[in-house]
Amino acid sequence: MPSILGAAASGMTHNQNKLDVISHNVANANAFSFKKLRPLHEGVPSPEIDPDAGRLGVAETTSDLIFSQAMTQVTDNPLNFAIEGDAFLRVRDFDGAIVYTRFGALEADVDGNILAANGRFLEPAIQMPPLWTQPQVDAAGIISALDLDGVRQELGQLSFARFRNPQGLQILGEGLYLDSANTGEITVGAAATEGFAALRTGALEGSNVDMAEEFTNMIVAQRAYSACAKTFAVGDAMLAIATNITQ
């Protein structure tokens, strides 16, 4: 493929991927604890990887997770908390694997289990004895409840993890992440201890999507896509002239 066509086609693909990521971010702008993606390109295509790409254009587009702190929203729910800093709550997934989340909406089931979002057990698990009531979480991540005499008793403490490279986490959906070889060393600890900030209770972390930024990026990507499409059309016309030059 002539360089002008290959470069223009790769530019169209890159900007389409950017628009897809922007749409994903905008769709989750009101989702609690959502972390936005940032589209990145890899520079000039490598002939060894893609021999048909030509010497010009944009290489494969990747997406980088942005874990910047978002604004908190007050809920006044005693089992809600917002994580300050870069830690993640440790949760036991349905298949038994330990996964991680920033979503701090806990709940108690009919058996007294304190559960994370969508019914997953905490890691380690925390459970209220029968007939105990009014569970709550404090700034140190300690879960407590009222016993049969109305005295508040500690049930356990939430466990958190920090990663050397959180951008290496795998996105599982439902606000969950899985560690990988790229996350590096994992540090496990409790809130309000060394390396871990205290929790903001009675609140949830919002999305870190900046709508003004996303719409600006959308306009830039749309204009770039249109320019690449125009360039492809020009290259196609030039190829047609060259093909018909002997006729």
Image (cartoon, rainbow, N blue to C red):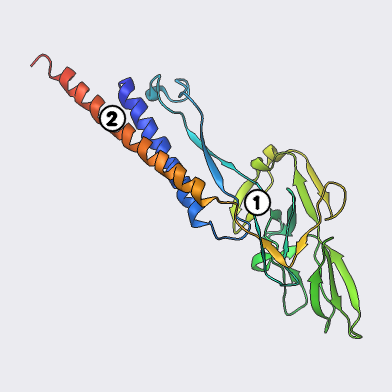
**Residue 27 appears in the picture as rendered:** yes
Q: Position of residue 61 (x, y in %)?
A: 48, 35
Tell me: 132 left or right of 219: right
User: Alpha-carbon distance for marks 1 and 2?
Assistant: 39 Å
Is residue 20 depicted above or below 129 in this figure? above
Local secondary structure at mark 2: helix
Amino acid beneath label 1: Tyr
Q: Quadrant where the C terminus lies?
A: top left
Rendered residue at 37%/24% (across/down): 52
Q: Quadrant where the N terminus lies?
A: top left
Of the image marks 1 and 2, the number of the one nearer the N terminus: 1
Local secondary structure at mark 1: strand
Q: Which mark is residue 232?
A: 2
Q: Which residue carries the number 1 mark?
A: 177
Q: Position of residue 114 (x, y in %)?
A: 76, 70
Rendered residue at 57%/60% (across/down): 31
Is residue 196 depicted above or below 167 in this figure? below
Tell me: 29 left or right of 231: right
Rendered residue at 81%/72% (across/down): 127
Is residue 4 depicted above or below 136 in this figure? above
Q: Position of residue 216 (x, y in %)?
A: 45, 44
Amino acid beneath label 2: Phe
**Label 1 neighbour load within 10 Å: few <14, some 14-19, many 20+:** many
